[in-house]
Image (cartoon, grey):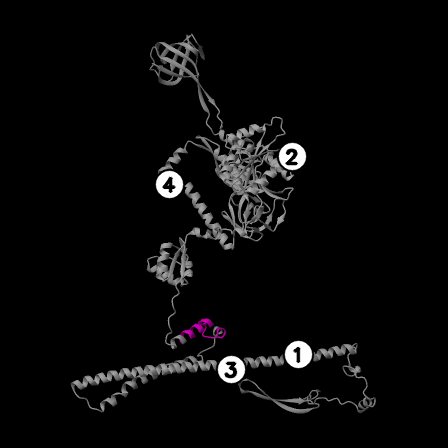
Amino acid sequence: MSDNDGKKTLGLRSGRPGQVKQSFSHGRTKNVVVETKRKRVVVPKAGATGGAASKGAPKTTPGGDPSKRPAGISDAVMERRLKALRAAKAREAEEAQARKAEEEKRERDRQRRREEALAKEREEQERRERAAAKAQEAEAKKRETEESARKAAAAADTPAPAPAAPRSAPKPSSAPRKTDREPRRDTKSKGMRDSGRRSGKLTLNQALTGGEGGRQRSLAAMKRKQERARQKALGGGEPREKVIREVQVPETIVVQELANRMAERVADVVKALMQNGMMVTQNQSIDADTAELIVEEFGHKIVRVSDSDVEDVIQGVEDKPEDLKPRPPVITVMGHVDHGKTSLLDAIRKTSVTSGEAGGITQHIGAYQVTTDDGTLLTFLDTPGHAAFTSMRARGAQVTDIVVLVVAADDAVMPQTVEAINHAKAAGVPMIVAINKIDRPGADPDKVRTDLLQHEVIVEKMSGDVLDVEVSAINGTGLDQLLEAISLQAELLDLKANPDRAAQGAVIEAQLDVGRGPVATVLVQNGTLRQGDIFVVGEQWGKVRALINDKGDRVKEAGPSVPVEVLGLHGTPEAGDVLNVVDTEAQAREIAEYRHEKAKEKRAAAGAATSLEQLMAQAKADENVAELPIVVKADVQGSAEAIAQAMEKIGNDEVRVRVLHSGVGAITESDIGLAEASGAPVIGFNVRANATARKVANQKGVEIRYYSVIYDLVDDVKAAASGLLSAEVRENFIGYAEIKDVFKVSNVGKVAGCLVTEGVARRSAGVRLLRDNVVIHEGTLKTLKRFKDEVAEVQSGQECGMAFENYDDIRKGDVIEIFEREEVERSLE
């Protein structure tokens, strides 16, 4: 077998052979034989060139020879490709030129920065040299002064040789140079040690962190270090001037907030507090007096503010007369229940609200806008007439300009009519009397006018100044005259408001809607309320998400005297709260939180007894009082308030109704839990319980009652409270008997022989023993006998024998009074 084993030897076929030297690690090299090929050059044939020349400038095709072009590419496509190629090359050239210019610019900037740094370093070096020279000169002067003083002292004692002074002069100067060299030598050796190569193996942590595995200094720390070094080199620098600030300090403030307001470090403030004997952290609160001490210690000025200052942002601003513009009047319709207030308003609006009211009576405040035939815009508020809605009527009178007092011609003045008159007088608003139901057979308008005189309401027909109009809501009689009287009264009032300021209004009604959340009916009194405004109302705040007018349409804004429903509240406000628009959410939230805290403190103060004696007296007084606890949920805030007030009026010294909770919205599981813990029923007024609440109520046996008319609710609660009253015990005297003689019978004791002088004597009745018309014993009979037989009763004029239960002190001539007790059920009036 040959060495080649039938295989060809590898070798270079063509080209020029050459050698390449390859280098490897550890100094190893290797020579490798390589082949160098020549570049192939294609030379066109002479015939082709000549043929082209002989035709004399033939048509040149873009892209060269069509035969060498890829298949399916036309001249136009080839031309576009070449154009794109040329554009790309031009772009590359421009980009390269731009990069080159950018590099040159960066290089110039770097050079400029280097020169500035060198110049600054030279200036720094010169300044240091000047400072060193100045210090050396001062030191030399000091030494010369000391030397001259020494010479003078030596000359006074013993004359010193002349050459001693020059020799001793260089010695002090040589010592500092030696000490100067020593630190430099240490610094140099330390720098050499620091800049030396690492000893030992390189660890992964060192490789990743770029150091010895420790924490690296940040860029900001390096800059601060350089700045400190520069300040130190400049002689320490001048200390910054202290900035004196005015620090606002409320009644309590957190330590960190105090430090922020003073622009001081929190650690310094905590340190100062600890030095004053207060061990507090940055998250703890301190009082205003302590904060004042700390502020004065840091050199600032303190400004004491109160928590109530947060409401300064909503203080009223006086409007200029030129900014005021006419506004529609607000008319409140008031009167006794079922005197036709809502029907009269329906006749004016040409609607039918009464048919939708439960029981045919109004139980909410309604706000509407009416445009008369002559284009005048009027805003009407319809108030309930029932006795339970006193607060609603008071609110309606407070926000109104004109009160229309509706009195039925067939019913005259009633209790709620008198109340409405008092509300109008308290609010100081003019009144128009509308005598309604003049179409009824028993109508007597003159009787109404006469009855109004008793309450100091003198109508024009009785030579007074109060307008009165006879109307009929059913037939539409007198409506035009009523609207004319309202317009005339409004012109006399000359009502104006500024629509170009932040809005201010009053909450007429508030409710919790299932789909829309808390909704407030607001009557805008000043300014213009717009969508997106941030406002605070009572203890709640919000951002206007939507405005809905009385017709149910969405509007973008509402001007003065316009009633709208406002959506976007964070909670249900109280009816009667004032709405104010503020600038920011932070202000609104701060004001709402402050009001909430104040209301909580007020409720806590009202519920807490001022002393232990009062607490004990109250507990003793309540010991014999039975309570009927209830939980009330209503559809609107005004109804819940009216029901709670009506419940407070039910009761007497023995029984009372206690409202555990009154709220707005559907009955929830938490309401059932509260009722179950207190053994109270849940009352829903125009609301229903959700599925979970109904299920829990069935499981726990909690009673849920639904009402839509306040009459029925009050009557049922009154009946339930009456059941807690103890029955009244009445005594009925049924007879008298006179003791004729006293006998002593064995096993019985003393027995009185009696003659029934009046009425009848019964065995089961109670008896009293009278001696000289004074009651000396009260009890029951042990035995009643007629002859020797035990009988149930003895009639008048008959004789009988009586023995008292557990009593023997009976004498001849005593009188026995016989009576029966009867229990009578009581009810609350």
Q: Is residue 215 magenta?
A: yes
Residue neighbourhood size for the residue with mark 3, other residues' Cα within 10 Å, grouped as few (<14), some (14–19), many (≥20): few
Residue 565 visible in rendering: yes
In this picture, which residue range is highlighted in magenta? 207-229
Q: Work out how far the residue at label 4 is from the one at label 1, CA to CA, in angstroms.
A: 91 Å
The answer to whether residue 7 is above or below residue 784 is below
Q: Is tag 3's residue or tag 2's residue first in the polypeptide sequence?
A: 3
Residue neighbourhood size for the residue with mark 1, other residues' Cα within 10 Å, grouped as few (<14), some (14–19), many (≥20): few
Discs 1, 3 touching: Cβ within 8 Å: no
Residue 353 visible in rendering: no
Q: Work out how far the residue at label 1 is from the one at label 2, CA to CA, in angstroms.
A: 89 Å
- Which mark identifies residue 91? 1
Name the residue: 22% across, 90% down.
164
Secondary structure, mark 3, is helix
Give amino acid for label 1. Answer: Arg
Q: Residue furthest right?
A: 55
Out of 693 and 370, give the one closest to the viewer: 370
Q: Residue furthest left?
A: 157
Disc 4 target residue: 610
Discs 1, 2 touching: Cβ within 8 Å: no
The answer to whether residue 86 is above or below residue 537 is below
